[in-house]
Image (spheres, coloured by chain):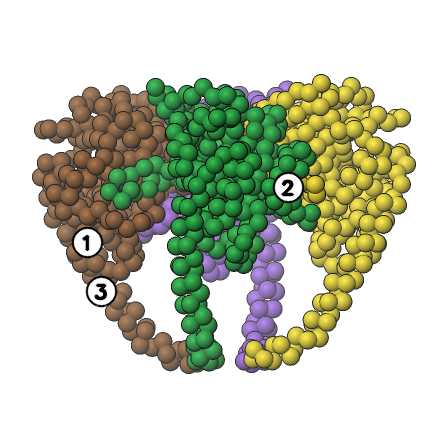
Chain colours: A green, B yellow, C purple, D brown
Amino acid sequence: MEKKVRIEGVITRMLEMPTLKESVLIEGLPGVGNVGKLAAEHLIDEIKAKKFAEIYSDSFPPQVFINPEGTVRLVKNELYYHRGKKRDLVILTGDYQGLTSVGQYHLVNTVLDLAEKLGTKMIYTLGGYGIGREIRHPRITGAATDIELVEELKKFGVVFKDEPSGGIVGASGLLLGMGKLRGMKGVCLMGETSGYMVDPNSAREVIKVLSQSLGLEISLSELESKAKEIDKISKKIRHIEKAMDEKKPDDLRYIG
Amino acid sequence: MEKKVRIEGVITRMLEMPTLKESVLIEGLPGVGNVGKLAAEHLIDEIKAKKFAEIYSDSFPPQVFINPEGTVRLVKNELYYHRGKKRDLVILTGDYQGLTSVGQYHLVNTVLDLAEKLGTKMIYTLGGYGIGREIRHPRITGAATDIELVEELKKFGVVFKDEPSGGIVGASGLLLGMGKLRGMKGVCLMGETSGYMVDPNSAREVIKVLSQSLGLEISLSELESKAKEIDKISKKIRHIEKAMDEKKPDDLRYIG
Amino acid sequence: MEKKVRIEGVITRMLEMPTLKESVLIEGLPGVGNVGKLAAEHLIDEIKAKKFAEIYSDSFPPQVFINPEGTVRLVKNELYYHRGKKRDLVILTGDYQGLTSVGQYHLVNTVLDLAEKLGTKMIYTLGGYGIGREIRHPRITGAATDIELVEELKKFGVVFKDEPSGGIVGASGLLLGMGKLRGMKGVCLMGETSGYMVDPNSAREVIKVLSQSLGLEISLSELESKAKEIDKISKKIRHIEKAMDEKKPDDLRYIG
Amino acid sequence: MEKKVRIEGVITRMLEMPTLKESVLIEGLPGVGNVGKLAAEHLIDEIKAKKFAEIYSDSFPPQVFINPEGTVRLVKNELYYHRGKKRDLVILTGDYQGLTSVGQYHLVNTVLDLAEKLGTKMIYTLGGYGIGREIRHPRITGAATDIELVEELKKFGVVFKDEPSGGIVGASGLLLGMGKLRGMKGVCLMGETSGYMVDPNSAREVIKVLSQSLGLEISLSELESKAKEIDKISKKIRHIEKAMDEKKPDDLRYIG
């Protein structure tokens, strides 16, 4: 079965329309430290979730990516599903978030329309929380649609900050906000991250809390090896920066 | 009763559809010194106005705010009503104005469509008028749809400047302009403000004129205590700035 | 008779629907040196043209202007008509051009839809041509939909430049281009101007050619007195600039 | 026959509706080094392709160009056709690509709707690949919808880079990506170019591969003489830059 629906600049290409029970929607799109996307992709790989829909939108850049073998693929979002023991999962990931406010609202509505058809009552959105400095043991900060969910997440070590902030901008926030208007519940899990590099270390912590909360068993070894790789690159960069810093006064003297 | 209407990127969530007589629409959205929003919120609190509608729009940022207890709320505008002795009030406030020109026109049309159903014939829009310096005794500058309203406001000390200006940009101007096209009358009350900080002092002066004009009795003590708070913060900032100014020559010498 | 039509973010408020014969559309909207707007407004005043339509659009800024007496008016475009001996005139002027490309196309289509109903076969668009320096005797550069019109305009001293240029951007170009697609003919008259100030002197030269081409007799005294006023202001500014230039070396020495 | 279709801000003006068999769509719009546009225009000239459609869009700038004789033409895209021995060709070129993401998607959809009616199963998109330095012997880098096409192009010397890149942004990428969703196949041929100047030399290499792949015989002399012209201009510029470089230290000393 393949069906294409084209509404107001969005094409939803349905590869399959799965019948799910009490499905939970999990979102991990590109963002700060790519934490959400890394976590969602890891989850898809580990539970071997199956792709059932692709979303193309004129709110994405007019762009194709080139695969290593020379073939192209249009930028898109993707939806996967997995039939779990307790609850079925629907996972949203992709190349981009909508470029404009209008595009963001439109895409989130498209996803929620589809999620409603799949019986979604609960949403997890995954992301990074930029703190502007490197962090070895990132905490998970959270937000939720309901106070009961806040209390539940605290049990898993999720931190709820009392200080004022700019809130959550983008799909991770909007899915909760627009979902709430449709009677869905949801939580956002944000892994602390420097914001300077992709951060599999932070994604691992997000997956830890997510799998505890959903009662899933997810191997973290893949994210751990990615984290080690990034760690090596970080060290190299720091090394180069240090070398450059030591040379700087001299260089500047020349300008003066 | 709850009804949701979704038109071209705007969702109007009706909590209640009040029956009002000769209702007056009062707008106070974020803007210069947040004067309008502060005034509208103060009015809502003091007269215990009741929320009856929420407006969500893809012209707002794709954002949720996080409440102190960890729950999220989607950015929105809100409409309140109050049954008065003489005239009923409808009050518009919210988190944002529309981000784009198209969004501004669209939102104002949404509000006016609703106001028409509530029998609105008269609009008050509240805002700040940035003058670029701190001011102890802010005056209220005004503008109106009709010369009779200009004359009436002059009685309450409202100043009408004869000099050319850029007019009124945003919801405060557009509600009057678009309202006039529908046969509604209206005035804009702008409290002078520095434009550098939120200004409850200026909001208090706006409320004074508004309550005189509408024949309302509104306590100002809440705004006054907020003004004192802001005053303290301002003094601290000035103190720090002064200290930094005194240190500056030295620092600059180092660079030179 | 008053009729309002609201289509896709544009409100056309018809004050009257005149019956015209072989009407000529003349456009003068804000632009370089405000030459087109000055010329169109002068024409409206001199021939006592009658306003018959107002166009409001969400492609304009969300703004009201404040009249000297304190009343507001929503930014708009306006259409006037005049029954001439030979040919009837329709004149378009206003506060703004559309802010975006989409807005420009949309507004021009709105105007051309209306012009078609008024039997328009011929369009004159008026504007300025920025040359980056002050000019005492501005020439009129032209462009037209047909080679016959080019030849005709040359008789009135209009210059057609052979050099490559960026073409004509905005309503003056688009009305000709979109009009041509509907089978209308048209010319653009651009008065040379510095581009730094509003330029009634250039507008006068535009009106000269326009009135010759249309066989109209238009007094130019009003534009001439405006030009003298601007001339005085220019001289003052040059005087101040000269004084500042002479002081500059000293000021810079201090920084050095 | 002339037909105009106006859909959502796009006007397609059909001068003729040719009946074609197995038509191949070739796109060359403005872009890096104008390589694609130069190649498409050269092809149109050499095979004497016939224009059958013009596309006007509110995603283009609101602009007319002025022809040397003083007449104007609205910015547009154009479609040409040519009945070949083996396969018929449809060629897309024009003044601009869509200015916004939404505009790009919309225009590409318009073209593909038309191409589908003309039986298009295969698309060639032509463009430049900026490498930031001058290049005497530009290679052709490629991308394709299918691995078979990749292999086929390698026979003609097309290079497929294994390194990560930003993909292909604009009509050249989007036509392949959106075409693939409709079951069309396609390749993108990108001539290496400095990115600093229009590059007929690179366009010639693109045409070489294109004509080999399509089994066409195309004279390259016209592009070669254009390339020589550009080469002369480049040399002059380099000469001036060198002279300026040699003077620079002196000028800078003055500032110091």
10 Å crowding of disc 3: few (<14), some (14-19), many (20+): few
Q: CA distance from mark 3 to mark 1?
A: 18 Å
Write down the quadrant of residue D167 in the picture.
top left
Write down the quadrant of residue C182 in the picture.
top left
Chain under callout 2: A
Q: Amino acid at mark 2?
A: Lys
Callout 2: helix, strand or loop?
helix
Q: Amino acid at mark 1?
A: Pro
Write down the quadrant of residue B22 in the picture.
top right
Q: Which residue is mark 1?
A: D138
Chain under callout 3: D
Question: At 32% from the left edge and 37% from the top edge, which residue is drawn?
Answer: A73
10 Å crowding of disc 1: few (<14), some (14-19), many (20+): many
Q: Which residue is mark 3?
A: D235
Q: Is residue D174 left or right of residue A91?
A: left
Query: Comparing marks 3 and 1, which lies closer to the viewer?
Result: 1
Query: Comparing marks 2 and 3, which lies closer to the viewer?
Result: 2
Q: Amino acid at mark 3?
A: Lys
